[in-house]
Image (cartoon, rainbow, N blue to C red):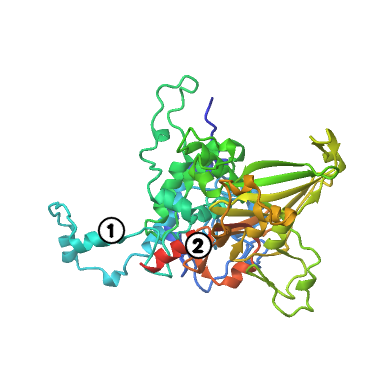
Amino acid sequence: MSTPSAPPPCPHLAAHRLSSRPLRFLRRCLRLRPLGRPEIRRDPRELPLCSPCAAAAPSPTSRLYACLSCAAVFCPSHAASHASASAGPGHQITVDVDRAELFCAACGDQVYDPDFDHAVFLAQSSSLLPSPSASPSPSAALRKRRRVDYRAWAPDPAEFALMSSADPTTSASAAAPAGLRGLNNLGNTCFMNSVLQALLHAPPLRNYFLGDRHNRFLCPRRTPVRHRATDADAARVACLACDLDEIYSAAFSGERMPYSPAKFLYSWWQHASNLASYEQQDAHEFFISILDHIHENIKDDQQKSHAQGHGDCCIAHRVFSGILRSDVTCTSCGFTSTTFEPCMDISLDMDAGDNSSFGVANTKPHVRNGERGLAGVNSKVSTLMRCLERFTRSERLDAEQKFFCEHCNERQESLKQMSIRRLPLVSCFHIKRFEHSSVKKVSRKVDHCFQFPFSLDMAPYLSSSILRSRYGNRIFPAEASDADAVSELSSEFEIFAVITHSGKLEAGHYVTYLRLNNHWYKCDDAWVTRVEEHTVRTSQAYMLFYVQKTLYYKACERAATV
């Protein structure tokens, strides 16, 4: 069995490397904006224009690219024309004037070069150095270079107490929470960065990796495999859990410069060769793929069978795995067939309804389960509560989906109802904003406004509540002794991450909003900024992450005591 390989790099970038010096020399052409965002250095009074059309960027979504060979500035359409019309090599590779990102005009896609990425890192690091006026004198510099004898450090009682109370998951500054670090875009990898930001701050998963429960230096999958009969050529096996452990260490190291998860991306390409490309991928598919491969890499107890639905065979299942209950009832005799299946997330259809309560005539705010209605803003509004009610609502199966009734001994019409038998520690809700019609062969994105509460009570959607509403307050011995029964406390959740999708279906962008210490932060690839609550509520939510309230408040209390 051969190891899947990564997609080939851009041929135009490879040709440019052979015909030109390394792109590290572009460090002198870079500068940083006040928030640390790199851009191409230019005169403040200079307005970059496209040379053929002499037009500036009309909107923030438009881009202007500078050719690395002739320094001419073009819009995306003229950049492609310039690349095809130029006879010499090198005119295909350009750099984004405002974002300092490499772009191949011939391929029409972002490209990644380690030398250029290092140049951006050096430009960001140089901005943190002290000014020349504060530099020491030559004699002082010579004294600092003088070698001193090594002395072992032994902490005193005060230092030892400080180390004992130190916690990498907390921070003394509310303006800069621990673990808040941007991730560089490696070429249409915003889908990966958005999911990684949510995983980095999922409390149970974060505690697992920061607690050294998976040590990348001791992982057996990182050791050479010498006795392999089926795959003798494979010396090492890529382990996503090890790469994720490295990202956790980098994020919670205290460093604020953006981190490049290139090693993690390459390892994921090895596991998911069908998705190994520089094209934009779906964040939800990436999330499920990551959990599946972590499940393959980490198995704490090989004796436990995850097929039984316990969901405790690995850290991914212990954190995200829940159990759904499906009841199919025969409409003729009332016989009910019950099945259980594990789930890592819940996908919800957007249901705008008539939304009469959200019309212009309604001026009072609508509040339900923590949701704040946006009266008079949009007639097409979906809410998380209505989507969950629709998910657990009883529905009549079509005539083509008649199920075989064991009591009637024939196929009968039936009613199907879903409910949640066991809630996970972290609940992930996937909002289906992308619709695909196999009949019309048309795909589109649903841009309806979606409202969601910050505090969520999942009790109405549990199997116990559904059965109670169906049969009344009867005591069922099988349900009463169920080990997966959910208590009232564990049914209350708090939101901690929201992944949004902006733009169209073909060309969109993923952004993550993190709730840390009761403040919201926007993680847009390498740029992390603090935002208001209203910005999060009005965003186009695509994935919602909730953690059990007891775990959320424990994390907040630990952060407040530091």
Residue visible at 53% across and 74% down in the picture: 45
Residue visible at 78% across and 42% down in the picture: 335
Q: Toward the viewer: 62 or 179?
A: 179
| Quadrant of the frame with the N terminus | top right
Q: Toward the viewer: 36 or 444?
A: 444
The amino acid beneath tag 2 is: Trp
Picture quadrant of residue 143: bottom left
Side of 313 relative to 219 (left or right):
right
Circle 1: element type? helix
Q: Name the mark on residue 164.
A: 1
Picture quadrant of residue 228: top left
Q: Can residue 353 be seen in this view?
A: yes
Circle 2: element type? strand
The amino acid beneath tag 1 is: Ser
Q: What residue did someone put label 2 on?
A: 527
Q: Earlier in the sequence, mark 2 or mark 1?
A: 1
Q: Name the mark on residue 533.
A: none
Q: Where is residue 402 in the image (x, y as percent from the top left)?
A: 83, 39
Position of 40 relative to 5 (above/below): below
Q: Toward the viewer: 409 or 193?
A: 409
Q: Is residue 462 visible?
A: no
